């Protein structure tokens, strides 16, 4: 797997200069290796920097293993979703991203499935402004809005999704499901996603659910103000690693839905009837001001590993791991001013957490409860901004996350 910084603006520029040369035109030998897309382009054009294609879909259809799709800035209003079914290879992934840091917006407002009526269902092929059933892609630096899901990936393996922003979609901002392994979801911002057709029951910031596959990693995500949960693992049967991720403000009815059904957990680490027993890992993360729990096992009896994670001011329990027979292990976690700090099951192991240390853990117990540094602009490489005081204990205790 390549380094997580695979698609920085500098690399895009360098790659295009290497492939296209200083004039921006490709040689005959390399004409198929880079495809440029621009709002002013033409799908009958050569796909070069000076003769770009018009649609991302046309570039996707032309792309072969090893190719690069560089998308110029602008809004791409879809009338059909972008469908990716051709896979790259381990040695030749296909790359799709913004050209030299330009702002690229993929807008699904005109897609019929974005406006599925209450009680209706979205046909599988229409799920996602970007619908992917392919492997070995590197997709980055796109803003995906108003879609029937933002990015929907089913049966996807060995992909890297970096620095995406998925917001205001009509279902989950990003959903990975099916037989999907070894995907990296890095520095995702996913917020304001909602599902009018279900009155808020299922639109999460990030959902990895209804599937299986090892090696999936979430790192550096921010998941906020979504109608249901920040992160949802419902019925995913293989372990997932989530780290350096924050989930906040989820589960509130900001859209005035009738019969509101949003759950409002920061991190939902299981679910189903019965919920599969899966040993997900959550570490150095934070959940705050969610409508329900900060972290919940949601019926998962597996050996969850919850380490150095902080919860603050959640309306429910900070760490809700009270499923009968559950085998969760909680180490070095912090709960501050939640309605209840923790709910433990009979098989849960809890050590070195704030509630084990005793004392009062309220807003005065930490250096800062102001999330502004953490929720502000990301670093130039897309990583989370520094927030060295946020929910850090004044007494120096080694509990909770550090950002």
Image: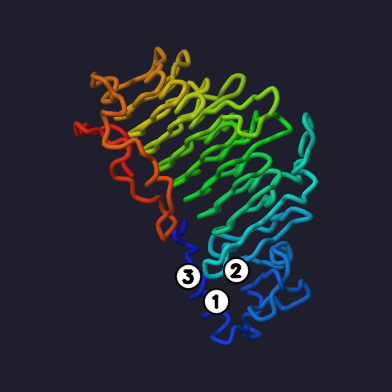
Question: Does residue 269 appear anywhere in the picture?
Answer: no
Give neighbour class at mark 1: few <14, some 14-19, many 20+ (Cα, 10 Å).
many
* Residue name at image x 46 percent, y 33 percent: 280
Q: Which mark is residue 11?
A: 3
Residue 325 is situated, as x and y percent measured from the top left of the image, at 45, 14
Q: Nearer the viewer, residue 315 or 179?
A: 315
Q: Are marks 1 and 2 in contact (CB under 8 Å)?
A: yes
Indicate which disc, 1 or 2, sits on the residue closer to the N terminus.
1
**Viewer-closest of 53 and 29:** 53
Q: Quadrant of residue 63?
A: bottom right
What is the x, y in percent for residue 364?
27, 28
Which residue carries the number 1 mark? 16
Relative height, residue 361 to residue 138 (above, below): above
- Residue 149 in view, yes or no: yes
Q: Residue at x 68, y 52 (%)?
A: 130
Task: Check disc 2 and report the residue beneath it.
Answer: 68
Under circle 2, the secondary element is strand
Say whether marks 1 and 3 touch (CB < 8 Å): no
Image quadrant in which you'd find residue 116: top right
Does 22 appear above or below 208?
Answer: below
Q: Earlier in the sequence, mark 1 or mark 3?
A: 3
Q: Label 3 near label 2: C-beta < 8 Å?
A: no
């Amino acid at each position: 797997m390549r380094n997580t910084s695979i698609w920085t603006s500098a690399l895009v520029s360098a790659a295009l200069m290497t492939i296209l040369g200083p004039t921006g035109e490709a040689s005959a030998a390399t004409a198929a290796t880079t495809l440029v897309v621009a709002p002013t382009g033409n799908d009958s054009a050569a796909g070069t920097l000076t003769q770009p294609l018009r649609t991302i879909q046309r570039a996707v259809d032309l792309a072969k293993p090893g190719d690069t799709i560089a998308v110029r800035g602008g809004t791409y209003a879809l009338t059909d979703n972008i469908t990716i079914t051709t896979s790259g290879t381990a040695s030749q992934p296909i790359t799709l991203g913004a050209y030299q840091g330009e702002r690229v917006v993929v807008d699904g407002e005109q897609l019929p499935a974005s406006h599925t009526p209450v009680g209706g269902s979205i046909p599988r092929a229409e799920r996602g402004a970007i619908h992917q059933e392919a492997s070995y892609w590197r997709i980055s630096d796109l803003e995906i809005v108003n879609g029937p899901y933002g990015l929907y990936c089913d049966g996807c393996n060995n992909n890297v999704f970096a620095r995406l922003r998925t917001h205001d979609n009509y279902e989950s901002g990003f959903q990975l499901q099916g037989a999907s392994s070894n995907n990296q979801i890095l520095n995702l911002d996913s917020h304001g996603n909602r599902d009018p057709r279900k009155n808020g029951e299922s639109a999460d910031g990030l959902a990895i659910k209804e599937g299986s596959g090892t090696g999936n990693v979430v790192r550096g995500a921010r998941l906020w103000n979504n109608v249901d949960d920040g992160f949802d693992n419902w019925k995913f049967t293989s372990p997932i690693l989530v780290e350096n991720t924050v989930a906040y403000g989820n589960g509130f009815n900001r859209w005035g839905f009738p019969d509101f059904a949003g759950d409002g957990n920061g991190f939902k680490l299981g679910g189903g009837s019965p919920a599969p027993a899966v040993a997900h890992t959550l570490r150095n993360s934070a959940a705050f001001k969610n409508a329900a729990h900060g972290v919940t096992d949601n019926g998962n009896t597996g050996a969850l590993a919850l380490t150095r994670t902080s919860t603050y001011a959640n309306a429910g329990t900070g760490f809700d791991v009270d499923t009968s027979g559950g085998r969760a292990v909680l180490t070095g976690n912090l709960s501050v001013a939640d309605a209840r700090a923790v709910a433990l099951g009979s098989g849960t192991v809890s050590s070195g957490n704030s509630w084990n240390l005793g004392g009062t853990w309220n807003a005065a117990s930490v250096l800062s409860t102001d999330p502004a540094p953490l929720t502000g602009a990301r670093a130039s490489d897309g990583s989370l901004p520094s927030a060295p005081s946020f929910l850090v204990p004044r007494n120096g205790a080694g509990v909770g996350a550090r950002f």
